[in-house]
Image (spheres, helix red, strand yellow):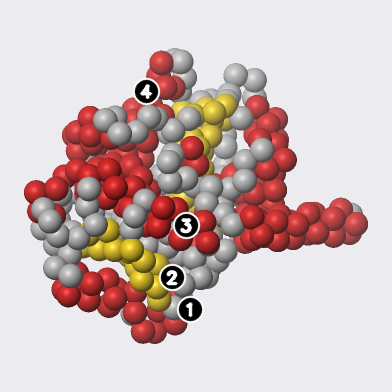
Amino acid sequence: MNPSQPATSIATMDDVRAAESVIRKYLSPAPLVRSYALEKQLGLAAGRRVWIKDYGWTPVGSFKLLGAINWMANHLETIGDRPVAAHSSGNFASGLAFAGMTFGKRVIIVMPEDAPKIKFERTRSFGAEIRTYDKSTDHQTGQRDRLTREIAEREDAVQASPYDDNDVISGNGVGGLEIVSELKRQERTVSHFVCAVSGGGLMAGHALAIADGFPNAQIVGVEPTGADDFAQSLAAGKRVRVDHPESICDGLLSYDVGVHNWPILRDHVSTAVTVSDPETCQAMKWLDTQHGLRTEPSGASTIAALLSGKIDLRGDGDITVVLSGRNVDPDDFRNWTDGAVAVQNRMAAAE
């Protein structure tokens, strides 16, 4: 959380529109691609379309660059000659590193020691420094947050949140504006918007834009079954913490949604569904086969929710689904997708 923001502040559409003028100076819109294969797979009625918003095309391979650029641009005066510190599973790390390179700021990132190699490589390639921690025991030790605070104190660094910050939320929301703008240009309507939820920075920003542009759209959150704090939060009507989230979706393992994110999610996201790791692996294999996209598990989780029939797709409009990132190590991708093929073969043999 940004200490300069009161806990009651909530990002708005005005903030998202302001962020767009910042983002456009540095980034082109991520592509919104029609998936004929998904339309066929889902058996949609004639006239309905499926669109994939693919953030794998950004310079850092994920959506995280949007929020990082907007955060950095809005904190330049505060940062001055000081470094910036943050914790990240990897994608915000490279996003913030890119932003630091863009604005000439030193960036120090705390990352889990078992993060994918590609996330370490991308983060370092943009000039950031990395400190690591043991993710497997962090729920007991709190090492991640402690290390980040210590860096902020010892280095006099400005601390950035990967999701629990209005500038991050607003920057991410620019991607939602891109979706709305393109589909309205084509005179399309949206019945369902499907997006992953972890800390909530991606979904909160997009939900603001989608609800504004397509107020009748059903906004659906997707989580791993072993990290379903948002689904539990929706059911309870308040933020719920999962102390030990587990999944191959390393980007979706926050303990809870952020303070700044929760009011937006509560007001705009109507449904949350969960997907198992095997279902996510099958979606990764499907995306590779049908679209030639090698995605990370977190990115494929939304496709898994569609392919596994977890979402009631009745309606008349189009379906838009977010592919949040594609940063996956080749060996891991091969192991997970080979496992998906083995599962499919066992299922076929049992029929």
Q: Which residue shows up at 27% across the image and 77% down it?
A: 146
Label 1 to label 4: alpha-carbon separation? 42 Å
Mark nearer the viewer, 2 or 1: 2
Establish if 96 lies above or below 213.
Answer: below
User: What mark, if any, has residue 136 been given in the picture?
Assistant: 1
Instruction: Mark yes or no: residue 197 visible.
Output: no
Q: Which residue shows up at 31% across the image and 52% down it?
A: 96
Establish if 46 lies above or below 274.
Answer: above
User: What mark, if any, has residue 329 been given in the picture?
Assistant: none
Instruction: Mark yes or no: residue 321 visible.
Output: yes
Q: Are marks 4 and 3 in contact (CB under 8 Å)?
A: no
Seen as rendered, the residue at the extreme bottom is: 140
Q: Which residue shows up at 44% across the image and 78% down it?
A: 134
Q: Are marks 1 and 3 in contact (CB under 8 Å)?
A: no
Mark nearer the viewer, 4 or 3: 3
Label 4 Cα neighbours within 10 Å, binned few <14 / some 14-19 / many ≥20? some
Q: Are marks 1 and 4 in contact (CB under 8 Å)?
A: no
Left or right, 249 with respect to 339, comes to: left
User: What mark, if any, has residue 112 been given in the picture?
Assistant: 2
Label 2 to label 1: alpha-carbon separation? 9 Å
Q: Which residue shows up at 44% across the image and 22% down it?
A: 183
Q: Secondary structure at mark 3?
A: helix
Q: Are marks 2 and 1 in contact (CB under 8 Å)?
A: no
Label 1 to label 3: alpha-carbon separation? 22 Å
| Residue on which disc 3 sits | 121
Q: Secondary structure at mark 1?
A: helix
User: What mark, if any, has residue 181 been given in the picture?
Assistant: 4
Q: Secondary structure at mark 2?
A: strand
* Numbered-mark total: 4
